[in-house]
Amino acid sequence: MALAQMKLDATEARLAGVTLPDGAVWARDARAAALERVRQMGLPTKRDEYWRYTDPSSLTAAEAPTAALLENDEGPLFEDVDRVRIVFVDGVFDPAASDDLSTEGVEIERLADAMQVDIHWAKDIYGVLEARGQKPVERPLAALNTALATDGVVIRATGKVSKPINFIYLHNDVASDAVLHNVVKVEADAEITLLETGPAAARFSKQLEVELGEGAVFNHVRAQGRDHERRAVTHCFARIAENSSFKSFTLTFNGVLTRNECVLEIVGDNAVAHVAGACVGDGKDFHHDDTVFVTHDAVNCESRQVFKKVLRNGATGVFQGKILVKEGAQKTDGYQISQSLLLDDDSQFLAKPELEIYADDVACSHGSTSGAIDETALFYLRSRGVSMTDARNLLTLSFLAEALEEIADEALAEELRDRLERWLARHS
Amino acid sequence: MLEIKDLKVKLEEEDKQILKGVDLKIEPGTVHAIMGPNGSGKSTLSYVLSGRDGYEVTGGTAALEGADLLDMEPEDRAAAGLFLAFQYPVEIPGVGNMTFLRTAVNAQRKARGEEELSAGDFLKIVREKAKSLQIDADMLKRPVNVGFSGGEKKRNEILQMAMLEPKMCILDETDSGLDVDAMKLVSEGVNALRSEGRSFLVITHYQRLLDHIKPDVVHIMADGKIVKSGGPELALEVENNGYADILAEVA
């Protein structure tokens, strides 16, 4: 009890003097309710069950640790992709650098503008999906994001959106502390692809809430890190309706601290939910955490979690993944795999795979492994004349392939694969 | 081409001598076969020559065209012209067969100071060579050896050999796991590569393969040594009488 009280006291101290952004009644209510959730739960500490492997102190501290601006950057991704660019600089929307937001099949508004409107569709999503995602596992940093988010966009796809929407996060201030909140609603039978790229800020709290209508399709490809010192906590909450498809892939290149939480709730029959991630981490400072929770609450749905981490020079990877199959969610097909490739003895991978099943006619499988480079395969490649370094890099790409294959768009996958190849060449 | 003198090898991890003084000289353009019972050291010889970890050379030499093989990294041995067709080719998910082949070919060319093949030239050559081994476009696109049948894997080994154009080819039990048709196809692939400047060392348990790939010299290996050498008739003798007679004779 004493500990719990200490935690709440620390939270109160951290929140003292916090003022919530103004807006329409529903927006103010959503923020106030979220702040109240934070107060109830308390900000996370290393003693919390889901923070045992990742130290949240730099994420909860009042001051953001600084992060040097990116050097030797390869330049932005997806330059050749015809897309709508939405640019944020240190977490602030930059209309001048962004494309015209009017695109066929989609409405895009700045969050702050949407929050001034008395009756807005975003009211039913903003903070609502996050609040649903607080059970059974508490995610206080997500609630804090909902309360404090200063910028972001709300997107409503009404048809097949003709080109991908690309959130580009630029970082220009070594001490920036960005809190972004984006909302996406994909109406029935609509289809949208969302790309997220860029180093973002010294400290980055980002939330994405996605509501899928019946038969909707949502594809998400994100590349984060890029050897940047930033610390990031990101949340994705999605509600997945009948016959709809949700697919999300994240590639992380180094960085200092990354915690990616993905909370998917399948509420309609015959739906598909895939979440995948690949990360490459180099050095003792690297810490990457994927925390995933997929709830099956409908019949005949499929979910996949595919996470691969390459760790070296003392890097740490964490995976906490759960599949919850609720009573009556028959014919569920759930798959979860988390694997690490440890390139030396100093690196570590901490995994907590969980299955909880209350239906009797389901097929769920999960696996988690840690391993080194396969010596036989290494010899095979070298015996063909491939150098030791190139052979190791090829086998590393081979290890990551299963995660990259989760990207539906082959051109996007190819571009990320190229980046990975170059990253490996630079770091070997 | 290949000259091995009194080669002695033990396992790195345990105190077990596998090769106890192997002598072997292979002239350019010839095909040698090594036969012998299980555990005689045939596969070890192929691994030691190609540079696999886990073995310690305790004596003797092995030279490819006069160059000391045992001092080189595996990739350098490959660039120098050595090729080992694996008994169990390795599956490499996520790496396309074509990408792998091109990486290997160009790595060797680079090591030899030659220009890398352009994508177009490479593709043309691969298609041509693949065709004669009945390797279709799909097999070239698929990840290396993943989901390949036993026969497909061995044909893929021969395709690599054809692309890399080595001087000294070692075939480690290439016939294992092959049905009659597959063996014929693989053998035809090997025979097509026979030339004046290229030598072969064929390791096998059975005479069968040697019906297709006709050797100039046959060696019998037992307990870490070559105990008898002769012409192709030696293989027939093994086929008919087993190893017991030969081993008794040399004991």
Image (cartoon, coloured by chain):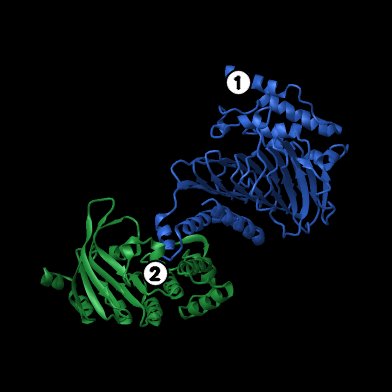
Chain colours: A blue, B green
Crowd around label 2: few <14 · some 14–19 · many ≥20 (10 Å): many
Q: CA distance from mark 2 to mark 1?
A: 68 Å
**Residue A135 visible within the image:** yes
Q: Position of residue B16 (x, y in %)?
A: 22, 54
In the image, is residue A273 above or below residue B179?
A: above
The single residue placed furthest to the right in the displayed view is A118
Left or right: A103 with respect to B9? right
Residue B36, can we see it? no
> In the rendered image of this protein, does residue A137 appear above or below residue A254?
above
Are discs 2 and 1 both within one chain?
Answer: no
Would residue B93 appear left or right of A24 to someone viewing this image? left
Q: Which residue is mark 1?
A: A4
Q: Residue at x 79, y 29 (%)?
A: A20
Give the mark toward the camera: 2 or 1. 2
What residue would you read off at disc 2? B80
Q: Name the residue rendered at 70%, 56% in the picture.
A: A78
Residue B53 position in % (x across, y down)? 34, 56
Q: Secondary structure at mark 1?
A: helix
Instruction: Evaluate if marks 2 and 1 touch, with contact meaning CB atoms under 8 Å apart.
Output: no
Q: Position of residue A424 (x, y in %)?
A: 54, 53
Q: Quadrant of residue A204?
A: top right
Three-letter amino acid code at disc 2? Ala
For image coordinates 49% across by 43% down, the residue present is: A313
Chain of the residue where label 2 is placed in the rendered structure: B
Report crowding for label 1: few under 14, some 14 to 19, many 20 or more residues within 10 A (C-alpha): few
Q: Chain of mark 1?
A: A
Seen in the image, is B29 located left or right of residue B115? Answer: left
Residue at 68% across / 24% down in the picture? Answer: A40
